[in-house]
Image (cartoon, rainbow, N blue to C red):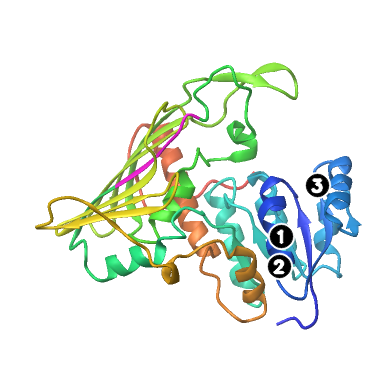
Amino acid sequence: MPTGKLKIGIVGLGTNTRLRHVPGLRACPDVEIVAVCNRRPESTGTAARDLNIPRTFEHWQDLVADPAVDAVVIGTWPNLHCPVTLAALAHGKHVLCEARMALNFAEAQAMSEASRRRPELTCQLVPSPLGLGVHSVVREMIDGDYLGQLREVVVIAASDVYADSSQPLHWRQIGELSGVNALTLGIVHETLIRWVDDPVRVLAQAEAFTPERIDTASGMQRRVGTPDSVQVLTILAGGAHGLYHVSGVTRFGPGTQIHLYGSEGTIKIELTPQEKIYAARRGDAQLHEVVVPPEKRGGWRVEADFVGAIRGENAVEFTDFATGLRYMEFTEAVARSSAAGSAVELPLSESIAPA
């Protein structure tokens, strides 16, 4: 456990880091953000001036190697999550890495193994924010046998973010930057596996309904590298069956929801636009809202939990690298199944080597 001020360096200070991580870290006592490195020197300088960060680096490798930095926050696109994490751990730095964990399952394995070899260092992934507010109550209901035997799971994450084909290519649609991470698939799956078993079988189909978009960097049409529509059938370890509808092309869709159907009851969790629980058991006339008491409502504590874990005050729950590896295995299995047109068994017997 470090004594004195905890000195943080940031690699990739983008929107989420500005909105959440910087203020969250600065709200923690004896924490100082001492360094920043972005993709371009101009962006690095702007971030340093805007946020009063004293030191800048042109290359992220120099930041993670600097002995004055105790911990590294990685806010880059997924293509850099693995190399920056591995380098930071090799230099003895604690790591807070943005979701999604990595480009693919192999990179996630490398990150998880590197973390396992350095147990004295805290490694945390920025969690899916979905469900944090209602988590403890949903967990209590499941543990209290509200559902009975779980039979079916339905996961819906349907929006129209990519419905307009005239919109330019988003970085999340570039395969080299985003890897196997399709839409919010990994994010909603991470939320789901807080409450149910992991899948043992995956059958998926995926489509990019707008196959090409304008790349604003070049002004040219470029092939879309990730799907804008995904459907998945799963079988869970406990025997329940799952159904996923994850889409960015669903106009007037139902938003983001998780439904858990059991032999004795149902729990429906609405995750957007606000988190609500609806439930009913055998004999009830209809679903009713389950009110979450203020003392049981969770929330965003990512930065405080990261600092607390470094100082030995708490363990990482949302989200440790082991959990990240689980959702990356699932997203990889979905990508493999949709590409092959056949079911994929889990756990995966082999991984794709990192690029």
Disc 1 marks a residue whose amino acid type is Pro
Q: Residue at x 57, y 29 (%)?
A: 225
Mark 2, Cα crowd under 10 Å, few <14 / some 14-19 / many 20+, is few
Question: Quick check: 147 above or below 117?
Answer: above
Element assignment for label 2: loop
The percent position of residue 87, horizontal first and vertical second, equals 74, 60
Q: Earlier in the sequence, mark 3 or mark 1?
A: 1
**Residues at marks 2 and 1 touching, judged by CB atoms closer than 8 Å:** yes
- What's under tag 2, amino acid-wise? Ala
Q: Judge whether residue 154 can be spotted in this image.
A: yes
Residue 337: image x %, image y %? 39, 38
Judge the density around disc 1: few (<14), some (14-19), many (≥20) Cα neighbours within 10 Å. few
- Image quadrant where one finds the N terminus: bottom right
Query: Element at badge 1?
Result: helix
Q: Which residue is mark 2?
A: 27
From this view, report whether residue 56 is shown above or below residue 257. Answer: below
Residues shaded magenta: 154-160
Q: Secondary structure at mark 3?
A: loop
Q: Nearer the viewer, residue 178 or 135?
A: 135
Q: Nearer the viewer, residue 153 or 178?
A: 153
Residue at mark 3 = 38
Dividing the picture into quadrants, the one containing residue 197 is bottom left
Residue 153 coordinates in the image, percent (x, y): 28, 49
Q: Nearer the viewer, mark 3 or mark 2?
A: 2
